[in-house]
Every structure is written in C-alpha cells, then in structure tokens.
Image (cartoon, helix red, strand yellow):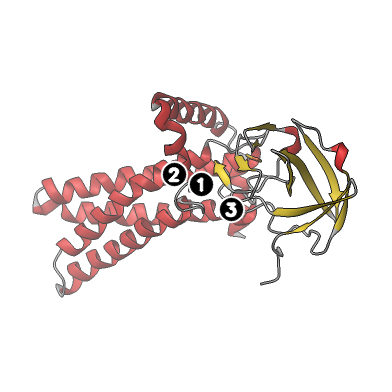
Amino acid sequence: MPETLIGKVVRGQTWLDPVSDFIQKLGKATYRVLGPAGPPTRNLMHGTWLLRHPLHPAVTDVPIGAWTVGVVADYVAHFTSRIPESAGDIALAVGLVVALLALITGYTDFGDTFGLERRFAIAHGLLMTIVVVVDAVSLALRWWGSQGVHPIAVALSTVALAVLLLGAWIGGHVVFGIGYGVNHDAFLDGPEDWADAGQTDDVPVDGMHVVEAGGMRVVLARAGNRICALSDICTHAGGPLHEGTLEGGVVTCPWHGSRFRLRDGRAVGGPATFDQPRLIVRDTDGRLEVKLEESLHEP
Ligand code: FES
C-alpha cells in the first residue's frame, strides 16, 4: 500500500535529524537577526497575526494550482498549438513567486516541530525546496535559453510536478496523519453549564492554578482584581499552560512559547494560531464556578 510504503521510507531516514537540527537553528537565527521585527514577522508567517489561522496551507494552494496549470498548458501548446508556449511559462513564474512565501511560512512552522512530525515535515520541506529549484531552472531555460531547450524546460517542470505530488502527500500526512498544526482543543469537551472550580483563595495573586471542571482541565489566574479561566491545553500542540509563565495578563506556554491573552484567550504570539477556549467565571461566597463562553461543538 503506497501510504504505508512512503510512511515507512520517511520514518527510516535518520539522516534527516541532523539536517532538521541545522535548519531549525538557522531559522531561529534568521528571525533573531531581524531584531525587534523578528517576533512580529514570525507571527505573521505562522498566521498568528493578521490571518489568525495557519498561513502556510493557504499559501501553498497557489503554486500547486499554477504549476499544474503550467504543465497542462505546456503540453496543450506543444501538441495542439491552440495556446502560446508563453502560457505555461507565465503559470510557472506565478507559482514560483508565491512558492517563495510558501517556503518561508513552511520553514517557519517547521521550527517548532519535533520527533516523528519533524522527520516527516523536513522530508516535505526538502522535497518542496527541490521542486522550487527545478522549476526555477526550468523558468531560466524558458526565458534565457534558445528555442531548442524549451522541451528540456517542459520535461523539468513535469518532473517537478511529480515530486510536488509526493511532497504534498507527505505534507498532508504531517497534518492529517500526525496532527501537527491542528487545533489541539478541537476535540475537547468542557462545561456548558456552571461547574465547580474550587476555592477563590486557591488562585494565587501572581501565579496560575489548574483545576478539573466539567470534564475540562482549566487554568485560572488573576488579571487585576478579576479571575480569568482558559482551557489549560495549548491549542498549538497540547502543552500545559499552567506550567508556563504569566506576565502582564499574558500566559506563555512552556513548550514552544505561544502566548495567550488571559482575559479572552486570544493567541498574541505564535506558533499557535488558534485562540484558547475561554471560560467565564463567577465567584459565589469564595467558591468559583466556570462555564465555557461558547460551546466547543454546538453552533
Ligand atoms: S504546545 Fe506549542 S506553544 Fe504550546
């Protein structure tokens, strides 16, 4: 079965780990070089800022579509002459321009992967990088080569499309098979009606307190003289928020440093792109009760 075969092959590529180490360090160093512009740029590339949804999968649709159209146009032009050769060249160029953004967003997301997902993610990233390089060579031949090399350029784009399909399969497996990038609170249940959350005094003045309430692990903390409650499971990869840090009304996850605003759960720093589920809190004679602000599953 092809799925199992590809999965087994990628899983066995231990040489990808030192390559991943190097690329993750390079990515972090690159954002550090940007100075104060580094964190907002990184948030933009993850999709935490502006799109407020993962950016990489949205961007990748453009080159995949453009390159597919380009290869089809190449062959239609070659065999029927119903469209000019330049149609394939233009589609290839459009795909390449947007593919650069796809590479940046993809390698930015890759910076926070680990274990099995990291091995599959780097296989995906390297294949897509090869596709970009091969298509760039193809475009250069079309623009600067003689008419005689055009068939070679078409052959290169065709091979690149085949590699792209393999890379896309692996990228899809990273998300749908391994679960990287999905909202880790998507399958949670929580209290839709008031549920007991312990004593008010248990919530420290400067720290966080975790409780089980209505089947959900909830982190409680004070923002000024108000107590706020969020799901304790980080939407990015499931990290325990109560083990992180709290500063200025913002909780920082201990695993990859995503930051969430306590008062509304908003993701204000990546890699998380999804907000934390927020619960409303009431205090009755020193006893806390919480319930979800919005149902997690009902419309
Ligand atoms: S689990 Fe990755 S930032 Fe929280």
Instruction: Say few, some or many: other residues with alpha carbon within 10 Å of mark 3 (under 14 / 14 to 19 / 20 or more).
Output: some
* Image-based side of 35 in relation to 280, left or right: left
- Marks 1/2 in contact by CB < 8 Å: the verdict is yes
Instruction: Say few, some or many: other residues with alpha carbon within 10 Å of mark 1 (under 14 / 14 to 19 / 20 or more).
Output: many
- Tell me the amino acid under the disc marked 2: Leu
The residue indicated by pointer 3 is 175
Q: Nearer the viewer, residue 35 or 170?
A: 35
Asked whether residue 284 appears in the rendered view, the answer is yes
Please determine whether, in this image, residue 154 is positioned above or below residue 206. Answer: below
Q: Nearer the viewer, mark 3 or mark 2?
A: 2
Residue 147 drawn at (x, y percent): 9, 54
Q: Nearer the viewer, mark 3 or mark 1?
A: 1
The image quadrant of residue 64 is bottom left
Q: Could you tell me how far apart the alpha carbons at marks 3 and 2 are, in whole angstroms?
A: 20 Å
- Sequence order check, earlier mark of 3 and 1: 1
Residue 134 drawn at (x, y percent): 31, 45
The residue indicated by pointer 1 is 48
The image quadrant of residue 199 is top right
* Disc 2, SS: helix
Q: Could you tell me how far apart the alpha carbons at marks 3 and 1 are, in whole angstroms?
A: 17 Å
- Tell me the amino acid under the disc marked 1: Thr
The picture quadrant for ligand 1 comes to: top right
Q: Nearer the viewer, residue 26 or 11?
A: 26
The residue indicated by pointer 2 is 44
Which quadrant does the C terminus fall into? bottom right
